[in-house]
Amino acid sequence: MSATVIRGGRLVDIPARAAPYTDILVVDGVIREMGPAGLAAPEDAEVFDASGMLMHPGLINGHTHGHGGLSKGMADRWTLELLLTAGPWISGSRQVEDKYLSTYLGAAEMLLKGCTACYDLTYEFPTPTSEGLAACVKAYADAGMRAVVAPMVADISFYEAIPGLLDALPPALQKRVEAMRLAPAETTLAAIRAAIHDWTGPASIRPAVAPTIPHHCTDAFMIGCRDIARDHGLGLHSHVAESRMQVVVGKRLYGRTQLQHMDGLGLVGPDFVVGHGVWLDDEDMRILAGHGGSVSHNPGSNALLGNGIAHARRMLELGVNLAVGTDGSSCSDNQNMYEAMRTAIYVSHARGPEAFAEWLSTAEIFTAATEGSARALGLKDVGRIAPGYKADIVFLDLTSINLIPLNDPVNQIVQAEDGRSVHSVMVDGRVVVRDGRLAGADMARLALDAERARERLTAANADNRALFTQLAPVVGSYCPGLSAQPYHAERHAHIH
């Protein structure tokens, strides 16, 4: 038995808006007891001195992309559709070591900024591989982070998925994008099954399945993803109603919303997570809530890509479980959950004073970024600091300028904190960040490895970058034009 007693720290109490002094006894990574100073502990228990620290549950990232770690800072004034167009440039030519490095970079950043678990929708072209997913698992294990890792998959390419886009391209570009066709559905489904069969790693890192965007998937493919997830007791996660263009395309292809179509195929359940959900309507939310499903609210990415402001208040009103996410570093540029929480507050207020009733509170967002995200990840024993829960705990330095004076700990964690106050982080009772440093990480070496990878991938993807510059004007004009059109049903053969 391994025991640690945490003494001298102040624990955030969300309902009370307070931070009383609290000692915590951790046994074998699980919180056993909590109480006032002087809590009894085994004689051989290790003492963790939390004096001068504010303790809160580890933040949980409900939606990110580990493959985006090496793409940080590459996007500027891109819509979602331009980001997808840029994919072969900013994420192409990756070797297994690049997949590990990219994922590790994101994990390191999350841990250093108080995030102890994430839902990672990671991508490999043209299909997921056991080796690539094993590299992602190893990255999280090496960093000391909890994760759900879902291969992000489809069987229809971006250019084939959007009605009329392929025809809008000049013939020469049509020929170029033919090379971006994805593997047949059964090939990819078989690859997912093989990866799950070959899955190794700690119990804290689990698989899931992510059919990326509904109209990028045939019905048969989505059903195949559903069956794999159900057969293995895994979660399903998809980008649904992220942009207005997706809504227009969904209505044309299905004669109903994307969410309603996926529900008709049996994908929506308590283990189903909608990424973004900016354009969900009330009926979508009611369906999702009725199944016990979740939405990962990713306000930074939604704003950066111009997708709009998700109606998080309405989701809560209708009973949807709300999580919070950063999205990938290729479309939000960092993995800072404090910033994601603050942005969620700000964008809800941006609806204006006439919509005051729709404003989110700091307590609601803090709860969404911990307990709500835990539920989205399918984790029943994280997201709170309470007996019986895993000891995933963040320790903030109360001498940090962000927390002086400590007027309201909940407000200040959500609206004032930016990650610089993180002193230490525990995952499963093990200290993975101490004194602001990630255990076992050589940051100078990490920077050197990343720079070498950047140089190599820049050269390897030069042609993909040139292709993006040719495609961008067409995609950048066609997709917004399609988004502006009224909805109408127009079924396409490739969906069935």
Image (spheres, rainbow, N blue to C red):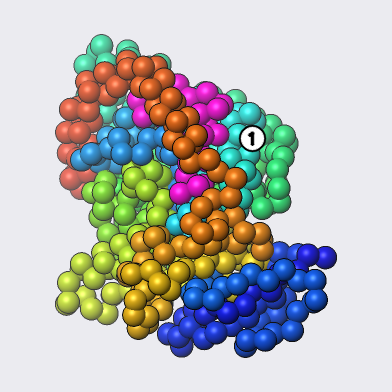
Residue 100 is a magenta residue: yes
> Magenta-highlighted stretch: main secondary structure?
helix
Q: Say left or right for 454 vs 12.
A: left
Instruction: Residue 66: give x, y in percent of width and height.
Output: 48, 41
Mark 1 Cα shell of 10 Å, populated few (<14), some (14-19), many (≥20): some
Q: Say left or right for 177 vs 186.
A: left
Q: Secondary structure at mark 1?
A: helix
Instruction: Residue 197: give x, y in percent of width and height.
Output: 73, 36
Residue at figure coordinates x 20%, y 67% from the top left: 350
Outermost right residue: 1
Quick check: 355 above or below 344? below
Give the position of the N terminus as an image quadrant.
Answer: bottom right
Q: Of residues 465 and 250, which is closer to you in this image?
A: 465
Q: Say left or right for 490 vs 265.
A: left
Instruction: Residue 402: give x, y in percent of width and height.
Output: 34, 69
Quick check: 322 above or below 457? below
Residue at figure coordinates x 46%, y 62% from the top left: 422
Range shown magenta: 89-109
Instruction: Residue 123: give x, y in percent of width and height.
Output: 49, 34
> Disc 1 designates what residue?
134
Residue at figure coordinates x 26%, y 46% from the top left: 305
Residue 266 is a magenta residue: no
Q: Of residues 481 and 65, which is closer to you in this image?
A: 65
Tell me which amino acid carries mark 1: Ala
